[in-house]
Amino acid sequence: MAIPSFLPPTLQFYPPSRLVPTRLTLSSSTVCCLSVDRRINHASTLKNDEASALRAVITAGGTAGHISSALAIGDELKSADPQAQILFIGFPNSMESTTVPSAGFDFSAIPTVGYSSSRPFLCFASFLRFPLLLIKSTFESYKLLREFKPQIVVGTGGHASFPVCFAAAIMRLKLVIQEQDSIPGTTNWILSLFADTICTPFNCTVSNLPKRAAAKCVVYGNPIRQALRRYVSKRAARVSFFGQWAGAVSDARVVLVLSGSLGANAINIALLNCYLQLLSEHENWFFVWQTGVEAFDEMDSLVRSHPRLFLSPFLRNISVAYAAADLVISRAGAMTCSEIMALGKPSVLIPSPHTDEGDQERSASLMADIVGSKVITEEELDTITLRAAIEEILGNEELMREMSERALRAGKPDAALDVAKHIISIVKPEDK
């Protein structure tokens, strides 16, 4: 894509040089002429820059996966066009209402369609209120889009994206949706009928969309944020968690435990009953343990302090945690799986049984087939099975290398860039 020039055109000098005496004397009128000419040209250049800049609306909500994907796309659009005007739209008092502004993007809220909107027909009150709330939210989305005048709207799923994307379809705006799972969620399944392009993570996702939408699909993988792809040395990452002495430990092994943003009790309890014994038996092992915000106080009161244990409610700088890790223990959310593949990390996955339509079980099964991840169901999870999985992987150098190589081969670290390029090509086909 051509990058607009911010330099004003070369100013002509008045009077022409052939008429200028050897000793130049500028009158006040000449100075004024020069000053006005400079200002007009500069203003014209800025106006052209603003006119050529991308204007996009991105909408997502509900889960960290939807929001993370949306932010990754926003990052790449900004990198490709620093003058781009990007507006995020979501629900008020939600995860996106705090996460998006803290990432440096403008955010506008639309009325929520209700907490039970994903299953509105299971509750009679929701059944009655849902259509009215959806109409109201769609109308507010319509007003925001008409005011902002985007060239394209991008939806990455979640409840908030439906009214915004549906309003975009009504206004006949260009519409791109990005799905993170192998089986699309209800919102993206419906929106795929109206979208110009559907960006999918896997080939199998395409077959799970309506037949008329399949021709509009492109397979790019799941977008991950730029911060995760920046190089951080393993030694520096470990020093940031455990101090200078940790960088000098030979053959150190770091286990990164991600119990989710809120906290997965099953993972926390299983690890609570074996972490101290593992640290005692393996003097070169370290644990970086994200307990989840809601579970932190309880875990903090039960876990003994240890120099090779870092306990945190939430890891804001997750890129450093990944850089430090040799093994990742986590739920099997679509975005977490994509990050594990892109970064080439061996993993133990414990899919949540509480997700809609078994999304995490499918993601974990795919990871086991593609990259060799060890999968433990929540029914199977206890101290014995978790400990056995950790020791099996960390105790086998060849297995760790194989899992890492398979993950890197399957990963698509440039997915966000590919999606951003596709979006720009729709808006500005001459820049293809």
Image (spheres, grey):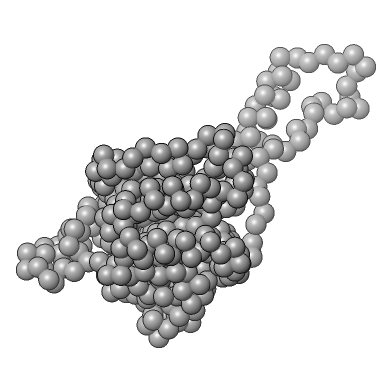
Question: In which quadrant is the C terminus drawn?
Answer: bottom right
Q: Residue 381: percent from the left, percent from the top?
A: 31, 65
Q: Nearer the viewer, residue 418 or 149?
A: 418
What residue appears at the point 42 percent right and 80 percent down from the top-left corner?
Answer: 213
Give the residue displayed 43% in from the left and 47% down from the top.
Answer: 280
- The image position of residue 129, as x and y in percent, is 11, 63
Classify residue 112 as left or right of residue 410. left
Q: Nearer the viewer, residue 201 or 267?
A: 267
Please determine whether, in this image, residue 155 is positioned above or below residue 14.
below
The residue sitting at 37% across, 37% down in the picture is 305
- Does residue 250 appear in this view? yes
User: In the rendered image, is residue 62 in sight?
Assistant: no
Q: Is residue 220 above or below residue 147?
A: below
Residue 377 at x, y = what percent? 33, 70
Residue 45 lies left or right of residue 103; in this view the side is right
Measured along the vertical axis of the image, is residue 397 above or below residue 268?
A: below
- Residue 58 in the image: state x and y as whole percent: 41, 56
Q: Nearer the viewer, residue 239 or 120?
A: 239
Residue lying at 33% horizontally and 60% vertically, measured from the top left: 383
Q: Does residue 357 appear to the left or right of 347 in the view shown?
A: left
- Point out the image quarter for the N terminus: bottom right
